[in-house]
Image (tube, helix red, strand yellow):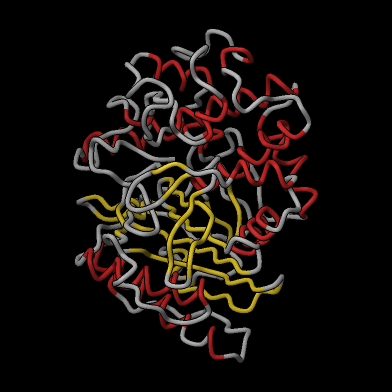
Amino acid sequence: MQLPAERRRLGLRIASAVLAGATVVALAPTAMAAEPVRTGVEQSSTAPERGLQESLDALLKAGGSSAGLAEVRDHGRAVWRGAAGTGDLDSGTPARADGRFRIGSVTKTFVSTVVLQLVGEGRVELDAPIGRYLPGVVRKGDAITVRQLLNHTSGLFNYTSDPGFFPDPDDEAGIRRWLDEGRWTTHSAQQLVDIANRHEPYFPPGTDWKYSNTNYIVAGMLIEKVTGRTWNEEVERRIIRPLGLRDTSMPTTAGSVPGRHAHGYFKLSSGLVDITKLNPSMAGAAGAGISSAADLTRFNAALLGGRLLGPAQLREMKQTVDAENGTRYGLGLMQMSSACGDFWGHTGGIPGYSTVLIGNADGTRQVALSQNPYDRPADPAAAGRAMLEFLNKAGCGGGGDATAKSAGAFVVQPYALH
């Protein structure tokens, strides 16, 4: 999910990007200044994976996060996994590499995969108007195609950019009200689309690109209309169970993160507040998912390795358009540059959590990273370099010139849905 680009762009994009998350427990902010707790396990004795724990520690220290975890998978085997920081600030429990976390917009890749499976089954046409399947649901639905929803060229207003949906990051009184009330609100898909429909589209369909969570709320509604089951049920039936992703779930309104997990926090003037529990219907098919680094790397490997989609549908998924920050966007799949070539995946954030999932084109190497941002980094450029160094080293099996590959900096920011 992604919150107001117009009000401080808090998205994350790999070549020049923004990691986002959010947070709040009544602890003094100075409690976060301690050195990261190292709990990583380097599982490979080969040189390419050495030093990743140190890079993860440096990333956490630079980025204003309370915890982080990651896994690197190569040719079907986890060659490294690690964690840093504190998973629970009340108890002081260290973060764990096998913990679960909210994945934000990485959910979109799961949803798009289901839509493309329906395309392969002849039940959905990519270039048919969404109005054929969901008449009257969105403005100008007869002119917006399914493809344009999936690649963010529909022009539909992003409902999370509505000023009434989520308070401005600098509005502490509004943040407090949201913490007390807004984060527990149940939203239906139609209610979220209705918010978007109150606004003019950004541009005529197919004429430009703009990230909009509304597109994937509508894609979730499409899945339900065509299959008779909710998008959550179809992701479970078609992806989670077949791949044996035991840590992955697509909740509707359940507020907890099950199993072991690092907590997420908001930083207020009075200290930190635990934001781990919230009603995920605010994100729905645009970003409600929960997973683990191990499950995400397996999913990315299966997707890009051709196990979830037929060749024609996978080619469609990788047909990209110009996006932002030097990236390109396919159908729920981002194309991102690295020191060793292009990677494919997605980024995501929801209050308390920020995620990166990347993999190479043939599905042989993957990286999943989760952080728990609670504060803006003191030095955004240093945070960006630390992020690029980690992703290049993890994704490429070695270092790489992070600065040369950066069109800007990775910046960890709080208070975001992306």
Out of 393 and 124, give the one closest to the viewer: 124
Q: Residue 194's quadrant in the figure?
A: top left
Out of 291 and 34, give the one closest to the viewer: 291
Residue 149 image position (x, y, % from top left): 51, 29
Identify the image quadrant of the C terminus.
top left
- Residue at horizontal 36%, vertical 52%? 20
- Residue at horizontal 66%, vertical 46%? 314
Q: Going by the image, does 307 lie left or right of 294?
A: right
Q: Residue 243's quadrant in the figure?
A: bottom right
Residue 322 image position (x, y, % from top left): 39, 43
- Residue at horizontal 19%, vertical 42%? 170
Out of 121 and 375, give the one closest to the viewer: 121
Residue 42 image position (x, y, % from top left): 57, 84
Residue 226 image position (x, y, % from top left): 72, 21
Q: Going by the image, does 207 lie left or right of 116?
A: left
Q: Is residue 258 above or below residue 166?
A: below
Q: Is residue 195 above or below residue 238?
A: above
- Residue at horizontal 57%, vertical 33%? 253
Q: Going by the image, does 412 lie left or right of 372?
A: left
The residue positioned farthest toward the top in the image shown: 136
Q: Is residue 261 above or below residue 255?
A: below
Q: Is residue 23 above or below residue 41?
A: above
